[in-house]
Image (cartoon, rainbow, N blue to C red):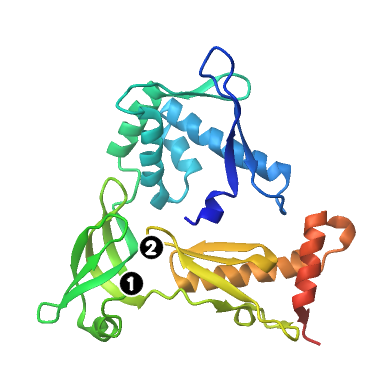
Amino acid sequence: MTRDIEDRFQLHCEVAAEGSFYQPTFIAEKDQSLFSPEDVREVAEITKNLLSSIGAGDEQGFKKVVVDSAFRSPILASLGKMFEGQGGHYRLAVEDKSGRVIADSVAASEAISRFKESRLSPDTHTIVTGYFNKVDFKEHKLSLLIPSSGRLISCIYDEDIEQALLDNARDLIQVVGTIELDEDGNPQRITDVQEVHPVNTDDIDVIDLLPEYLKAKELNNLRVQVQLSEDKQTYFARLDELGIEQAAYTRSDLVDALQAELEFLWNSIAKEVDENLSPKARALKEALQKFFQEMS
């Protein structure tokens, strides 16, 4: 995850209450944007529901909050570090606004251990990104170095994708197949390799993302910046001029998401009457109409 997205919503810590280690905290958006106070409250509610499911040992509740199974193991690992402390030298309790304890170290540690044992994360994943390390053409065997774990994993590939391997030797590549994950959510084995794609972080010309009924105005050279997450497994895109941020596992999915967002913004913001828009939304409307126009 990029630093910008991590910073979108922050946990603010106030001065600890006198005579104790009780520290009031609240969630707030870092910068003023299109998000309303209701959006921030929704993020806070999701955080509360996540911690409550851990505190209550509610496995189904945890699955409901963390819908994407690929994120469950990393989240459990992070919560484990938070609640289990430094070798048990401290205990943590989290209260809601009313003062009710929704999670504490003892209950949370037990729940996290049980959730891990029940393998809430999937046994398999379909896409993994790594550095092309070496290939055995005789045995059709590929070795891939996984950036997040530093683990070197091997797999058998179909002869049909051999040219793709040759074209991307020593590069960062995405392998599509059956990927088995370890308990921490890191790839440990690949079978049934179906496709190999190069990783492409080139900028995207906004003109290539517009729906067929829109065109760019003159002197419009907007480009979407593309980068990979720290573990190299996720694409991130941003277009600062319009406040757009998107994420996806593949570049093609990223392009689809950007196209959908631009179309949504044009129909929901650019074509809306000013009276129905907030000040931030009106500023976005002006930017959209500055850069684009409908086909005549």
Are the residues tagged 1 and 2 within 8 Å (C-beta)? yes
Q: Is residue 102 left or right of residue 261?
A: left
Looking at the rendered structure, the secondary structure element under dot 1 is strand
Residue at left 69%, top 66%? 242
| Label 2: element kind | loop
The residue at 78%/81% (across/down) is 294
Q: Which numbered disc covers residue 172?
A: 1
**In the drawing, does residue 250 fall left or right of residue 137?**
right
Quarter of the rendering containing residue 285? bottom right
The Cα atoms of the two marked residues, 1 and 2, are separated by 9 Å
In the picture, the disc for residue 272 is: none
Q: Quadrant of the C terminus?
A: bottom right
Foreground residue among 261 and 207: 207
Where is residue 173? Give x, y as percent.
33, 73
Image quadrant where residue 104 sits? top left
Q: Position of residue 138 (x, y in %)?
A: 10, 81
Mark 1 is on which residue type? Leu
Q: Is residue 222 left or right of residue 108?
A: right
Residue picked out by circle 2? 232
Q: How busy is the neighbourhood of tag 1: few (under 14 within 10 Å), some, or many (20 plus)? A: many
Foreground of the two, 176 or 2: 2
